[in-house]
Structures are given as C-alpha cells and as structure tokens.
Image: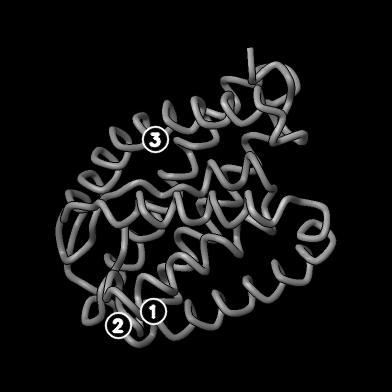
Amino acid sequence: MHIPDGILSTHVWVPLAAGGVGAVALAARAARKRLAEESVPLIGLMGAFVFALQMLNFPIAAGVSDHVVGAGLLAVIFGPSVAMLCMAAVVTIQALVFGDGGIAALGANVVNMAVLSTLTAWAVYHALKERLPNVAVVAATLLGVLAGAGGAAAWVMLSQPYGAKFLGAMVLTHFVSGMVEAAVTLAVVKTLRAAGLVPGVAKEVAR
C-alpha cells in the first residue's frame, strides 16, 4: 500500500500532505489523555510489531505494494487517536529510513494507513463490539485494510492513466491479505485480553 515518489501528481500529493499533517496534529491533541492512561511499553511493543510486519510486502502495480497494515490491531487495542499516531510514526520511519514509500508521497501514505484505515477500523469495531465482539475485530481489520487500499488506488488513478482494472487488483489482493490480517489480529487481541493487558477490549473477545 506504500506509494513511492513519482507516481502521484503535484495536485494530488500536496493536499494529501497537508491533510496528513492536520490529521496527525488532531490525533496528537486527542491522544494526550489516552497516552497517559495506557501502558507505554505495550504501545511501543505493538508499534514495533506492526512496523516489522509492514516491512514484509510485495508489489501489485504502479509501484504500490501489498502488506500487513496493522491499523485495525492498533485501533482495537488503543483507540483511534493513539493508533493514528503509531501508524503515522511507522509510515514516516519506513519512508525516511528504509525508503519504503516516497517522501513526497508520505502524506498520502499517512492518510491511507494512519487515517483512512485506522478510522474505518475503529468505527466498525465501535459499532459492533457490544453485540459481536469477535466479528467486530475481524470486520474492523478487513474494512480498515480495504479503506486504505481504496484510498491508495484513488490517488494513483487521479495521477496516472489507470482504469478500473487497477482498482480491482488493489481491492482483490488487499481483500485476501486483509482476511489473513484479520485472523492474526483476532488472535493477538484474544491473547492480550486473556493476559489482562488490554482492559479496554470487550471481555467476550477473549473467549
């Protein structure tokens, strides 16, 4: 899902960069209280876990790659604001240190994975967690992945002469990887909840 430089047009990546900065700033402000309440070591551990998983990726087309996103996992465990900050940090470090995703495209990648994926995952989880907690985790993860992939496809299609086939390829490949990620996310959430490390997650998820 990382978009490299040279793919997005200026009229696409500039507003996305501004939007990404604004979204991260709002998340930082909202996360102040949450960061004080949560276990900082667990936040660091889960951020590092997502970072490592995201390094394993394979190309789809037009320089866009498919990989584990991790936004659903972080959103379910920590809520949207902390999850957005973690995801933004992961995406930024990958771009600046490892060249995974472009510098000019950094705003787009932050919007896709830290904003669209995270907020979609949290909204789905929040809507379903009381009635169907396990389904909520799976659906949140999958739809979060697809939201980010849809965003990436949209920005590329606005910049390059690609048609519906590109969008189809993005959705199909990320649907498959999203299902795998959803299963992994549910397993991790159950493990953490059973160990008493995530008091904010519904108890039924651990069953």
Q: The disc labelled 2 sits on which kind of residue? A: Ser
Q: Are marks 2 and 1 in contact (CB under 8 Å)?
A: yes
User: Vertical placement of 204 versus 75: above or below?
Assistant: above
Which label's residue is closer to the chain start, 3 or 1? 1
What residue is disc 1 on? 12
Q: CA distance from mark 2 to mark 3?
A: 31 Å
Snapshot quadrant of residue 20: bottom right
Residue 79 x %, y %: 69, 48
Which residue lies at the image location 27% right of the left edge and 76% below the top edge?
Answer: 99
**Structural distance between the alpha carbons of marks 2 and 1:** 5 Å
- Mark 3 burial class by Cα count in 10 Å: few <14, some 14-19, many 20+: many
Q: Nearer the viewer, residue 160 or 128?
A: 128
Left or right of 184? Residue 188 is right
Label 3 element class: helix
Mark 3, residue position: 181
CB within 8 Å, label 2 to label 3: no
